[in-house]
Image (spheres, rainbow, N blue to C red):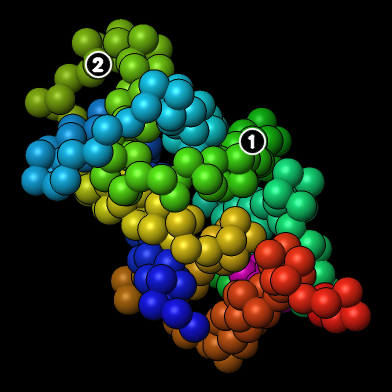
């Protein structure tokens, strides 16, 4: 495996680790009184500011007008629709339901990549995706405390969030490869902030920050710095060096992180089922990584069939 792919895998593990703590943290912030749209707005504005600050200390890249337009649409699918639907859906459903639904991302991405990028849907890839899904579901169901909050509207919103992000992974892969993560994200989060601010302007005025619980203030700051700024700094590095389906497969790491966080916090314990699930998830990632890409298939002779 070359160094670029190793960087891609490392970046995705880091990003998914940060996203793994976002659902329980977001649920606590919402329970403290912050609205879903306002939390989303805090993430977007805060991340935009941080990316513009860090861009002052990195090499300036000139972005063509065409790519600036493409970055706007990338921000719609990768940030605005994805984050708004997820946070709003999380407020209407349980963390368990939301976590289960997020396992659909690799499947959606595999199908879209096959349609749009003509990536082959091989037996090895399908097997890896579903093996990882089984492992993730074992972790999620095993950690469930019976809270299944059957709010179908919330579940539907979380599904929309996954579909939106899978579109971002597939449709904008070439754009992501052209620019550095800082350049890409400073523009994407700027566009995202512009799109969301008109809908949250009234909430910014009405909220009493001085009277807000500490979990709302510090939780929102942690949400901006961790699961937003740092994770989206790592995400383009993974997208640039890995295929969309491989990138999406790392979504299965999130339940693993949640499981370890629960053990660390003393509200859960590590079981044999947890160990089996973790092995299944990373075996699934390995199988998808080893599956043949379209470029590999074209480079091979017609006599060599994809696995």
* SS at badge 1: helix
- Tally the marks: 2
Q: In which quadrant is the C terminus drawn?
A: bottom right
Q: Is residue 252 magenta?
A: no
Q: Height in image: 3 above or below 110?
A: below
Q: Is residue 241 visible?
A: yes
**Is 78 positioned to the left or the right of 212 in the image?**
right
Picture quadrant of residue 204: top left
Q: What residue do we see at 78% from left, 46% from top?
A: 115
Q: What residue do we see at 83% from left, 77% from top?
A: 301
Percent of width and height locating residue 133: 69, 68
Q: What residue do we see at 26% from left, 28% from top?
A: 45
Q: Height in image: 154 above or below 292?
A: above
- Residue 204 - label: 2
Q: Residues within 10 Å of mark 1 (few under 14, many from 20)?
A: some
Q: Is residue 162 visible?
A: no
Q: Are marks 2 and 1 in contact (CB under 8 Å)?
A: no
**Is 246 positioned to the left or the right of 214 in the image?**
right
Percent of width and height locating residue 305: 87, 78
Q: What range is drawn magenta here? A: 130-137
* SS at badge 2: helix
């Amino acid at each position: 495996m070359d160094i670029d792919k190793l960087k891609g895998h490392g970046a995705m593990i880091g990003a998914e680790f940060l996203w793994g703590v976002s659902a329980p943290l977001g649920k606590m912030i919402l329970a403290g009184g912050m609205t879903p749209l306002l939390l989303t707005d805090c993430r977007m504005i805060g991340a935009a500011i941080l990316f513009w600050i860090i861009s002052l200390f990195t090499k300036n890249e000139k972005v063509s007008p065409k790519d600036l337009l493409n970055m706007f649409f990338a921000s719609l699918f990768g940030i605005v629709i994805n984050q708004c639907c997820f946070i709003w859906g999380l407020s209407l459903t349980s963390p368990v339901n939301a976590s289960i639904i997020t396992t659909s991302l690799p499947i959606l991405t595999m199908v879209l990549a096959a349609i749009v990028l003509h990536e082959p849907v091989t037996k090895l890839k399908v097997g890896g995706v579903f093996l990882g899904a089984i492992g993730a579901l074992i972790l999620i169901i095993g950690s469930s405390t019976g809270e299944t909050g059957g709010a179908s509207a919330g579940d539907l919103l979380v599904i929309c969030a996954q579909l939106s992000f899978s579109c971002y992974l597939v449709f904008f892969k070439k754009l992501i490869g052209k620019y550095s993560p800082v350049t890409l994200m400073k523009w994407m989060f700027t566009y995202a902030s512009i799109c969301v601010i008109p809908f949250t302007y009234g909430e910014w005025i009405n909220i009493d920050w001085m009277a807000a619980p500490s979990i709302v203030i510090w939780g929102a700051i942690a949400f901006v710095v961790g699961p937003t700024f740092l994770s989206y700094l790592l995400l383009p590095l993974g997208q640039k060096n890995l295929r969309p389906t491989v990138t999406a497969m790392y979504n299965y790491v999130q339940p693993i992180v949640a499981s370890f966080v629960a053990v660390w916090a003393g509200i859960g314990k590590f079981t044999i089922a947890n160990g089996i699930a973790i092995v299944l998830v990373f075996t699934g990632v390995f199988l998808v990584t080893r599956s043949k890409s379209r470029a590999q298939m074209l480079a091979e002779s017609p006599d060599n069939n994809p696995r």
